[in-house]
């Protein structure tokens, strides 16, 4: 059963994925762009089963850090 916090985190993950897709538009090479989006998606999908709120939050923060690194490089 999902708690309210789980629901909020689920929406946060969806918004994060949308951010990744929008940010990937700045990557000029189409194959690199699709690989980047696929990599972020696999990171999100891999942790789909998690239920511990603190672990979910730390995973979201890790993905945000990785997204910032990708944006700085491109």
Image (cartoon, rainbow, N blue to C red):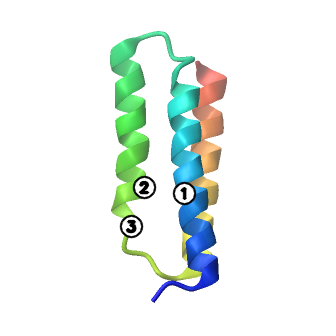
Q: Are marks 1 and 2 in contact (CB under 8 Å)?
A: yes
Q: Do we see residue 12 in this rendering? A: yes
Q: Earlier in the sequence, mark 1 or mark 2?
A: 1
Label 1 sits on residue? 13
Whole-Å distance between the Cαs marked 2 and 3?
6 Å
In this rendering, the count of numbered labels is: 3
Q: Residue at x 36, y 57 (%)?
A: 45
Label 2 neighbour load within 10 Å: few <14, some 14-19, many 20+: some
Q: Nearer the viewer, residue 4 or 39?
A: 4
Q: Earlier in the sequence, mark 1 or mark 3?
A: 1
Above or below: residue 73 compared with residue 11: above
Q: Residue at x 42, y 32 (%)?
A: 36
Q: Is 30 situated left or right of 57 in this image? A: left
Label 3 neighbour load within 10 Å: few <14, some 14-19, many 20+: few
Q: Residue at x 63, y 48 (%)?
A: 64
Q: Which mark is residue 48?
A: 3
Mark 1 vs mark 2: in front:
1
Q: Nearer the viewer, residue 55 or 4?
A: 4
Q: Are marks 2 and 3 in contact (CB under 8 Å)?
A: yes
Most extreme residue toward the bottom is 1
Which quadrant holds the C terminus?
top right
Q: Are marks 1 and 3 in contact (CB under 8 Å)?
A: no
Whole-Å distance between the Cαs marked 1 and 2?
8 Å
Where is residue 42? Give x, y as percent. 35, 49
Label 3: element kind: loop
Where is residue 56? Give x, y as percent. 55, 70
Which quadrant holds the N terminus?
bottom left
Label 2 sits on residue? 44
Above or below: residue 18 compared with residue 7: above
Examine the image and state in which quarter residue 35 appears.
top left
Whole-Å distance between the Cαs marked 1 and 3?
10 Å
Where is residue 8? Give x, y as percent. 63, 69
């Amino acid at each position: 059963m999902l708690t309210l916090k789980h629901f909020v985190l689920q929406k946060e993950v969806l918004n994060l994925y949308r951010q990744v897709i929008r940010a990937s538009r700045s990557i000029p090479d189409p194959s690199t762009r699709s690989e980047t989006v696929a990599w972020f998606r696999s990171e999100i999908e891999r942790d789909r089963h998690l239920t511990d709120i603190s672990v979910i939050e730390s995973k979201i923060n890790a993905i945000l850090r990785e997204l910032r690194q990708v944006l700085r490089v491109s």
